[in-house]
Amino acid sequence: MSEKNRDGKRNARERLAAEREKQKAAERRRRTLIVAASVVCVLGLAAVIGIVAANAGKDDDSADAGPVVAPSGAQGKDALAIPVGKDDAKSTLTVWEDFRCPACKAFEAAYRPTIHELTESGQLRVEYHLVTLIDGNMGGSGSRNAANAAACAQNAGKFPAYHDVLFENQPEETDDAFAENDKLIELAGKVDGLDTPEFRTCVEKGTHNSWVAKSNQAFQDGRFGGTPTVLFNGKNIYQDQSMTPAKLKQMVEEANQG
């Protein structure tokens, strides 16, 4: 083989080796860019999730910047609980609810007959706390306005009946129908003696809006997982997958026997 041919083959091998090294370097750069881009995407997604989580359940309380007026008979810390049942009942059920919340409606539909039976017999006392979680998550003011109207109903001694009417007539979660005072007043017509000038004025003026905002803040401060949150004598029972109305009734009866 001539010297010229040997030099040509050597140069070809060197060029091939150089090209392979160039491709490897390009591949390393490509992988580096992919990893870097993936990290940026993950960090960006984490930031978005963090922002969403930070704002979940928050709503604009600027319209509630007035005096905190608790409804008649409200009890507990800062008078944020609306009580139903006898004060001397041995068992207490604490319920955090949002009138726009579908899960709250499902809870009420399943447990309402049992809760009514136990409160009316004097075995159970229920403390209702009103929340505006859906307003914060979905936008609107239906949770707040419905809660204010329920507080107005409490002033008239009609809270339990109106509470039930609101859940029975709950709109779709994305439908902010309860933001309309006319709708809330219309539903008051389903409760005997509730649709009065005093009730209408209370609803239209948002008399208890600041109280509702304070109740919602207490819910946020309590770091509860969501609505409904249901505590039996301080223990969260809504998270108990085995809980049923019958089991709740048994727990109340056993507490009364003790």
Image (spheres, rainbow, N blue to C red):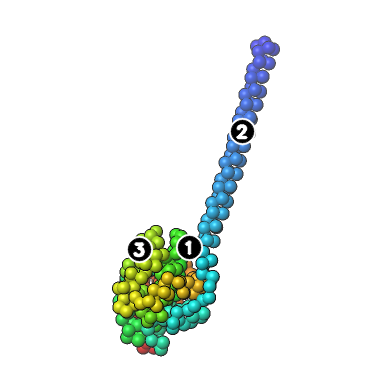
- Name the quadrant of the N terminus: top right
Res 218 visible: no
Frontmost residue, 5 versus 227: 227
Ranked by sequence position, the earlier of labels 1 and 3 is 1
Mark 3 surroundings: few (<14), some (14-19) or many (≥20) residues within 10 A: some
Res 90 → quadrant: bottom left
In the image, what residue occupies the spot 33% across and 69% down? 186
Q: Whole-percent x and y of residue 171?
A: 35, 63
The structure residue drawn at horizontal position 40% and vertical position 61%, both measured from the top left corner, is 176
Number of callouts: 3
Q: Secondary structure at mark 3?
A: loop
Q: Nearer the viewer, mark 2 or mark 1?
A: 1
Where residue 68 appears, x then y in whole percent?
51, 76
Who comes first in sequence, dot 3 or dot 2?
A: 2
The local secondary structure at tag 1 comes to: helix
Identify the mark nearer the N-term, 2 or 1.
2
Three-letter code, disc 3 = Pro
Q: For mark 2, what is the residue?
A: 26
Label 1 close to label 3 by CB (< 8 Å): no
| Residue sticking out furthest to the top | 2
Label 2, label 1: how far apart the Cα atoms are: 49 Å
Label 1 crowding class (10 Å Cα cut-off): few <14, some 14-19, many 20+? some
The circle drawn on residue 136 is 1
Kindly check if marks 3 and 2 are in contact, taking CB atoms under 8 A apart as contact. no
Could you tell me which residue is drawn at 45 percent across and 61 percent down?
140
The quadrant the C terminus occupies is bottom left
Percent position (x, y) of residue 98? 42, 69
**Can you tell which quarter of the image residue 14 is in?**
top right
Badge 2 marks a residue whose secondary structure is helix
Q: Which residue is mark 3?
A: 171
Q: Is residue 190 left or right of residue 30?
A: left
